[in-house]
Image (tube, rainbow, N blue to C red):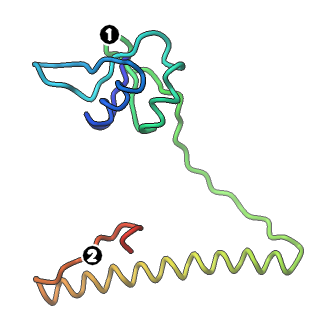
Amino acid sequence: MIVIMRTKAQAQKVADITGGVIVVKNGKPTPKVQLQGDFEQYRAAVESVSVLFRLCDDTGEQVPSGWTVTGTSFEVEWPKDPQKASLIRSHFGARRVAYNWALAKVKSDMDAKQKNADHLSTSWTLEAL
């Protein structure tokens, strides 16, 4: 079984944890790791590094990893207890306030950069905001 990770560093971690061997092509390591036996015995180790991987059999034919990505939408039934319903509304409101705050930060940063090319932008990641 061959596990294809997103990066060579992830592949090295998987190889270290599982005892697998990094696949080498043209004398250079690839993000592929050759594993012996059934993949299920390695699944937890591979997923501890990243859940974003692909699986191939020994011939290079891609096989399903067992993960399915889906999107769903559903309707929330509000609690009949007014105090609990108020708490849920409060959480939805707080989420919207946080979203609006982050959006305003990003927009103001873009405006400042447009006015002054030397403006040092902050990262727009969740941690930086």
The quarter of the rendered structure image containing the C terminus is bottom left
User: Crowding at label 1, few (<14), some or many (≥20) Cα neighbours within 10 Å?
Assistant: few
Q: What is the three-letter code of the residue carrying label 2?
A: Thr
Identify the residue at image location x=54%, y=82%: 97
User: Crowding at label 2, few (<14), some or many (≥20) Cα neighbours within 10 Å?
Assistant: few
Q: Which residue is mark 1?
A: 59
| Count of labels in the image | 2
Q: Which mark is residue 126?
A: none
x then y, percent, for residue 121 = 22, 77
The quarter of the rendered structure image containing the N terminus is top left
x then y, percent, for residue 39 = 48, 18
Under circle 1, the secondary element is loop
In this view, the residue in front, 80 or 1, is 1
Counting residues from the start of the chain, the first of labels 2 and 1 encountered is: 1
With respect to residue 107, does 28 lie above or below? above
Q: Is residue 20 left or right of residue 29?
A: right
Q: What is the three-letter code of the residue carrying label 1?
A: Thr
Residue 101 figure quarter: bottom left
Identify the residue at image location x=33%, y=79%: 106
Residue 35 figure quarter: top left
Q: Nearer the viewer, mark 2 or mark 1?
A: 2
Residue 83 figure quarter: bottom right
Extreme residue in the right direction = 81
Question: How far apart are the alpha carbons under marks 2 and 1?
Answer: 46 Å
Q: Which residue is mark 2?
A: 122
Identify the residue at image location x=46%, y=9%: 37
x then y, percent, for residue 26 = 10, 19
Extreme residue in the bottom direction = 115
Under circle 2, the secondary element is loop
With respect to residue 87, does 25 lie above or below? above
